[in-house]
Each structure stands twice: as structure tokens, then as C-alpha cells.
Image: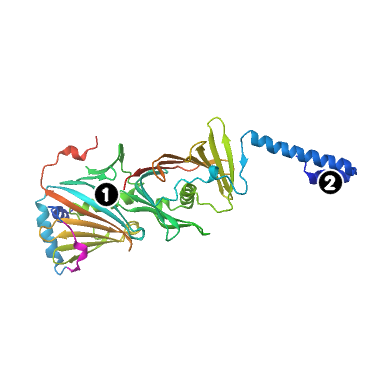
Amino acid sequence: MHMKSFKFYLLLVTYIVSGYSFQSDNKQFFPVKDVEALKVRLQNNAQNTRTIVSDFVQEKHLTMLDEVLISKGHFMFKKENSIRWEYNEPIKYLIIIHNGKFIIKDEDKVTKFDTESNMVFREINKIIVNMVSGRLPDEKDFEINFFENANFYQTELIPKSQEVEKILQTIQIFIEKKDLTVSEVKLIESAEDYTSITFVNKQLNIEIPENKFLTK
Amino acid sequence: MLTIRSLILRRQALEMSPAVLVCIKSLTFILALFLLLYSCSTGHYKAIGKNGDASYYNVSIFHESFSKVLYRAGIDLNKRHFSGLMLIKKLPENNSYRVVFLSEIGLKIFDLEFYFNKKNNFFVHYCLDAFDKRHVINTIKKDIESMFMNYPTEVKKRVSVVDKRENIVINYKLRGINNYYYKTINGDRIFKIERRGLIFKKADITLENYSGPFPDEIFITHKLLKLDIVLTQLNI
């Protein structure tokens, strides 16, 4: 990984700070005029972030079914590449990315991700955790656009890969302007269905024990 | 067995007298009646009359009052494991049921709709590549249909009693359908479904813990396909 891109990834890590009520999608967004300046700001911010700890609320909107399924959990990021993505409600489910390994704990069943059989899901999971931990994907995989309104930046990712495109139409990442923390990631599957993950109770640079990235 | 028609033909060939023919006809009728009564008394199969016997076959797995349920779902397909949530919802306005299987992170794995009272009673709204194979999606379709008991009115029903276990078995049969539903003799809930083909059993579906108008736990295993499904109800 190039140092420059790493810094950019890291700066996004710093997005997650304190919890608040998020209503970004109610407001109209316009293209960011100076994208490069924004990237520099994000990079500078990310350099100071060693860890992120946050709760999250995931809402699955099935518009045609008039249903919203809510999941809740806990998220951890530790520099350089350790992620703990833990669902507590309505089911217990844990994803860990650590030392290049991708592990899933489903109830008591621990599975090391098979990249051959689950490549797409692995990629999707990586995209999500990368977004939250401040990493933008390669521009060869996504068309990346930046928008803003009074309170938020919105990063829009449009997949170029056919594999990902079959599953996701667009990914939107909402970043709070006041502290450059990621507040919401929105995975849009179709005009009707999307998943939004809102981050609350965010804390930066607190100590995270190494065993949080191990499955017992 | 000799049929009346074959006996008539034989009579013509042998030029039997009418009196002998009447005797043969009567004997054949008595024999047929005996066989029918015998088959009922052994309890293997008992035909349902035109009006049916509601206590035997008027049972459902997803009760009429059912509106929706959320299951924790695990599906093993050809050594691949998929897990997440399965939402089953009745859509009265469409006269259908919708079955949506989602991964934990909310992305759809499949989204199926089962219509009632329509000839084309099944629609795939979305299906991930791994499931998008005719034999796989057809198998899942038949599994779910057998639980919804979404059958055309012309489906034939037969009831048998398995004496040793005292289970009532209701067989639903039509072209492409050969399903056996098991319930205890005094119970009103189905606890097992066997989906069979012409020769081989295709799937076992075990239904456990009805706390409401549907089972809380469902286990589906297949004999001819590496596909296992486990559903456990979540409170929503």
C-alpha cells in the first residue's frame, strides 16, 4: 500500500468520534468544489488516529415490504489493519479482520473465511469496514464522488466491478463536517432496498486489548 | 388382478352362459370390497371422502392468523455456509408470501414471492449467484411451498395412520408433488414433512416448538442435494 493512500485511509479513521442524532439524508447535497483539499484534510485528521471504538445501529429498509429490520452492535478498529465488527442484536455474530485473516464467529461456530467460496461477501465486508475505518477503495474498483451540505460531506462510491455491482448499486458515506467523523454508511442495493449503518458513542484513541481481535 | 372387462372377454372366448358370468361378476365385486375393507382395517391408507375429513387434513403450518416472522437463518449449500436473517411476510394485498434471506450486514441473498390463487405462483425478485441455479432455487421453492401448503385445489389427499408411533400421515399428491405431513394422532400441528419423488425421498423438514401461528424452529435436509437449512425464530 502506498503511504499516501494509507494516510488517506487513516484519516477517515478519525471520522468516528462522538455520538449524535444523524439526519444527513434529509438535506440536499452539492458537489464538493475542492476535492483535493478535502482529501488532505481527511488525511491530516486520520494521521492522529490509532483506534476507534463505536456502537452502531444497522437498519435494513425493505421498502416494498414496508419493513425495517434493526440490528445493533459494537465496532472496533486498531491501527494498522485490525477490525472487530460485532453484532449483538437480534443475533450474535462477529467478524474479525486481523493479521490478514478474515474470521467469522456465528454463535459458537468459528469459520475462517474462504476467499474462494465467499469472495464477494468478503469484499463487501471489507468495503464496509474500510469505510468506517477511514479507507477509500481503489478508484479502479469504484467511481468516487464527493458531495457536501451545511453539516456533512457525502462520499459516493459506484462499483465498477460486475461482481459487486450485482449486489450493490451505490455506497454512501456520510462524514460530519465539524469533526470529520463517519456518521453513517449507506449500502444501496436498489431503488427500494438499502442498509444504513449509523455510528454512535464513538471514541478515538482509547486502548483496545489485542485479544479483542482473537476468537477464543 | 382380473378385471370385469377381462372376464367378459374371456367369457366371450369360452362362450360361458349368462348365469356363470353373473356369478363371476358377483365374486369379483365381493373380492374388491374385501380388499378395500382389508386395506382400511390395516390402517395403511384411508381415503378421504368428497367432503374430506377436516380433522385430518385441514391443518396448516403457517396459520391463517400468521402475518410475519423473522428467523435466524443458516444455509449450507455445497460446502458454502450462508447465515443471516430470513423474513417471511404475508402480503394480503398481493395475495402472496414474501421470503427474504439477508446476510448479517443486510445484503440480500435471495428474495422470493409465493403467490396464491395464481397459475404462476412463484417469482424470484433477487437471487445471489450462488443460489441462482435452477435445481437449487427449485428445491428451495418446493421446500417453502410445502410449508405454506400452497397446493392447487386438485391435489389428491390421502390419510394413513402409523400405528406404532400413532402418527397421522397426510399425503398430498399431484404431478411433481408427493409430500407426506406427519402429526400426532391427538395433535393439531405438523411436526415433520417428507418430500418424496417417484422413488427417492428428496427432503426432510422438521418443524419444532410452535409457540404461535408458526413453528419456532425449522430444519430442512436434502437427500439428493448438498443443501441444509436451519431456521430459528427471533423475537421482533
Give the residues in magenta.
A21-31
Q: Is residue B111 above or below residue A98?
A: below
Q: Is residue A33 visible?
A: yes
Query: Where is residue B138 drawn, in percent x and y?
Result: 48, 51
Magenta stretch holds residue A114:
no
Query: Where is residue B69 drawn, in percent x and y?
Result: 37, 49
Amino acid beneath label 1: Ser
Please say which color scheme the image uses. Answer: rainbow
Judging by the rendered image, the residue that carries numbered circle 1 is: A71
Residue A186 placement: quadrant: bottom left
Residue B9 marker: 2
The local secondary structure at tag 1 comes to strand
The local secondary structure at tag 2 comes to helix
| Callout 2 crowding tier (Cα within 10 Å): few <14, some 14–19, many ≥20 | few
Real-space Cα distance between discs 1 and 2? 76 Å
Query: Where is residue B130 drawn, in percent x and y?
Result: 40, 50
Q: Chain of mark 1?
A: A
Magenta stretch holds residue A23:
yes
Question: Along the horizontal axis of the image, is B25 left or right of B176?
Answer: right
| Callout 1 crowding tier (Cα within 10 Å): few <14, some 14–19, many ≥20 | many
Amino acid beneath label 2: Leu
Residue A211 marker: none
- Given residues A180 and B147, the one toward you in this image is B147
- Given residues B189 and A61, the one toward you in this image is B189
Residue at point 56%, 53% (across, down): B153
